[in-house]
Image: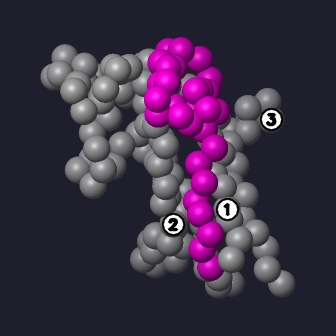
Amino acid sequence: MRQSNSEKKSNPHGSATGCTAGVRDFHGRRRRFRRARIHGRVTLSGRRYEHPRPLKANQPAEFAIPLRSHDHVFLKGHRIMVQVQSTWFPLIDRNPQKFVPNIYAAKAVDYVIATQRIYTSRTRPSHIVLPIVK
């Protein structure tokens, strides 16, 4: 088994965001075969939940989302679809999209609408790395 990664250059509107990514085999039915998430609040702090820090609003941030080892063969003619979201509520905890010390203690006023910009330019490329098995 090999690991694939999704790297996203994002421009969060607020001071906190989450990043969830899913990879699907898009052919007729969209079959999801891998998904993962990371809180933006810990991306800048070395992924340590003990010292979360706010993101800088409207500044590009890089998210490297490990999609873990998984075997999948894309058949000829199939396409890959990558989905990126800021939350998977109600499957996983809600994300206020605003930096608070503890997201589980967030109040109603802490929840704001998120605007995400995904970069795909030469200077700020977003990409997915998939192993090729011959």
C-beta proximity under 8 Å, tags 2 and 3: no
Instruction: Find disc 3 in the rendering and name its residue.
Output: 122
Note whether 110 is above or below 25 in the view shown.
above
- Image position of 65 (left or right of 134): left
Between 26 and 23, the residue placed more toward the observer is: 23
Q: Which contiguous range is marked in magenta?
A: 42-71
The N terminus appears in which quarter of the rendering? bottom right
Between 35 and 25, the residue placed more toward the observer is: 35
Query: Which residue is located at x 79 percent, y 30 percent?
Result: 123
Give the alpha-carbon distance from disc 2 to disc 1, as whole Å: 10 Å
Q: Secondary structure at mark 2?
A: strand
Give the alpha-carbon distance from disc 3 to disc 1, as whole Å: 21 Å
User: Residue 4 — which label?
Assistant: 1
Q: Secondary structure at mark 3?
A: loop
Q: Secondary structure at mark 1?
A: strand
N-terminal label among 3 and 1: 1
Amino acid type of the residue that numbered disc 1 sits on in the rendered structure: Ser
C-beta proximity under 8 Å, tags 2 and 1: yes
Farthest-out residue, left: 108
Give the alpha-carbon distance from disc 2 to disc 3, as whole Å: 26 Å
Q: Marks 3 and 1: which is nearer the front?
A: 1
Residue 92: x and y, percent? 30, 50
Instruction: Find disc 2 in the rendering and name its residue.
Output: 34
Number of marks in the image? 3
Query: Which residue is located at x 59 percent, y 26 percent?
Result: 44
User: In terms of image quadrants, where is residue 78?
Assistant: bottom right
C-beta proximity under 8 Å, tags 3 and 1: no
Residue 52: x and y, percent? 47, 25
